Image (cartoon, rainbow, N blue to C red):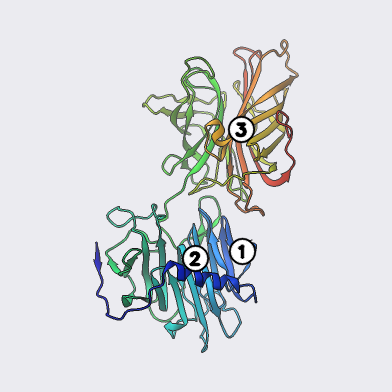
Amino acid sequence: MVTEMNVQTERRRIYTPAMLALVMLTVFAGQRAEAIEAGTVIFVRGQVSAERDPPVPLAKGDAVLVADAIVTGQAARAQLLMLDGAKVAIRPNSRLLIEEFLYASGEPVPEGTAAASESGDRAVYRLIKGGFRSITGAIGKENEADYEVRTPVGTLGIRGTDYTALLCQDDCEWAKEAGGSPLQNGLHVSVVSGIVVFRNEYGDFELTAGQKFVVPLTDRRPQRVGEPEDTGGSESADGPTDDETPEIPIMGTDPDGNMMDLTDPKRDPGNRTISWSTAPVGVVGAAFVGTQDNAPGEYVLDGANNLDGFAGPYPTAFLPRPGAMPPVRATFGVGTASNSETGFDSVTVLRWGRWSGGTANITLEDGTDASQDLSQQSLHWVSGPEWFGPPVIPLSGAVDYSLIGNTSPTDNSGNVGVLGSASFMADFTNMKVFSDLVLTINQVTWTTSGGVGDIGSGVGLPAHQFSGSYANIAITGRPTGPVTSTNGFFSGFFSDPGNTPDPSLPGGVGMTYTLTDENGGDGGVVVSGALVFGDPQPALPPAIGGGP
């Protein structure tokens, strides 16, 4: 329930968008006259940068400066430890400007240590987009006028406070009111402990621990809020409510093994992209590779965060063929099979493995049971990191990736082989990928060449996915007859930069493949596997039709 607060008669100056823009330009025009340190980055996840000239990617341990605008990308988070001991946890898709910061002692306050502010100390932030949680430090503890957070609808002051602020500007679809309706556009504030003072042209308002309010962008009149489900931070008001800076745990580990900001315990899980391959499967017994973006609830992770279930394409007919139906959507579960050869790379945050032995549960979208016996083959998979917006794909340039993980290749007769080598290159200018591999299984060596694929919408895929085929497959060591008919396919996706040095490049590649020798014995031989690549490096693209 939302009710209008009592307002005082005092009127304050209204800043128009043009006036605010002038203020912003004034700040940025002089921001590099002198680099004044304001704090340190103590945690980063995803793409986080400081808007300077040019912008600078931020990593743990980097200094943040007065006049820095800290920008977090989609699914990115950052935590700052300011010189006065304040902590600021910045949400994804946010922009927070450090307009002023003066801490006279100049000595950083160790994390968790109380400190006193001196006369003249001052901290002024401007929330331009998104939101944050702040556990305030020495500045503003004794004199609320020393601390300000300026927003498009008014100014926040504090007294010994732990609070969250979220600015919604048609970008808060993920957050809901208690009744399930989306948060309205405006400034949403929730006080965990201490006191928040809000000021605008309608007066001064105080909120204490447990209270929440919203200031709409339209009429700017502050309104108390009953119990919003999420304003971007913890709903708990436990802990000290006096002038001591609260010491609460705000760091933890997410399912991908990364340290993360835990000040938002109600954060919904994000999407994951899954690529999978197997030997004959489906109504027609086709070798198959596929990649699918999975929403929360579609993928299932086990206790070690390996893939136990997912949604993906399922072949119902050979393609291409006149009149053939495309793959249908199905749900896959590990069932009685085992997760074998699981791996995890902490830089790209990619996981991989294969289901083998037992029976995998497969249910088609119409409810048909299509469970698959895996006693003589494996289902290979690669699981991408959690994301809340698809990875951004460069518009130009070529990038070479190095193999960092794989499953052992398997065939449809129960044999397990060895991967010899694998390569992958992306040409983003022409939206092409190039991949080849060498493997040995059952004493037979398979060598592909001319592996070429397409990226994104040009082939009807999401922008971060790709698919392709191998033009040539050389098979040596096969004991029976000549090789007359082969084919091979691959499918996969690019992942976010993760912890790689260059945030402009996709940090990793996950892909699966199948290779078929139709003359290789009773019913042919099908080999499948999974590959993971990382360490992106700029490269020269090969000629179209060639390999890396």
Secondary element under disc 2, as helix, strand or loop, is strand
Secondary element under disc 3, as helix, strand or loop, is strand
Name the spot of residue 360 as percent of width and height, x first.
Answer: 48, 29
- Left or right of residue 230: residue 391: right
- Left or right of residue 187: residue 448: right
Q: In whole angstroms, how far apart are the C-alphas of marks 3 and 1?
A: 36 Å
Q: In whole angstroms, how far apart are the C-alphas of marks 1 and 2?
A: 13 Å
Residue type at tag 3: Asp
Q: Are marks 2 and 3 in contact (CB under 8 Å)?
A: no
Q: Is residue 229 visible?
A: yes
Residue to which mark 3 is pinned: 454
Query: Upstream in the sequence, badge 1 or badge 2?
Result: 1
Residue type at tag 1: Lys
Name the mark nearer the viewer: 2 or 3: 3
Direction front: furthest residue: 18
477 above or below 34? above
Name which residue lies at 40% across and 76% down: 240
Give the quadrant of the N terminus: bottom left
Direction bottom: furthest residue: 119
Badge 1, how many Cα within 10 Å: few under 14, some, many 20+?
some
Residue type at tag 2: Ala
236 above or below 501? below
Residue to which mark 1 is pinned: 60
Name the spot of residue 212 as percent of width and height, x first.
Answer: 32, 68
Query: Upstream in the sequence, badge 2 or badge 3?
Result: 2
Query: Upstream in the sequence, badge 3 or badge 1?
Result: 1
Direction top: furthest residue: 481
Name the spot of residue 108 as percent of width and height, x first.
Answer: 59, 78
Q: In whole angstroms, how far apart are the C-alphas of marks 2 and 3?
A: 39 Å
Q: Is residue 439 visible?
A: no
Residue to which mark 2 is pinned: 89
Image quarter of residue 380: top right
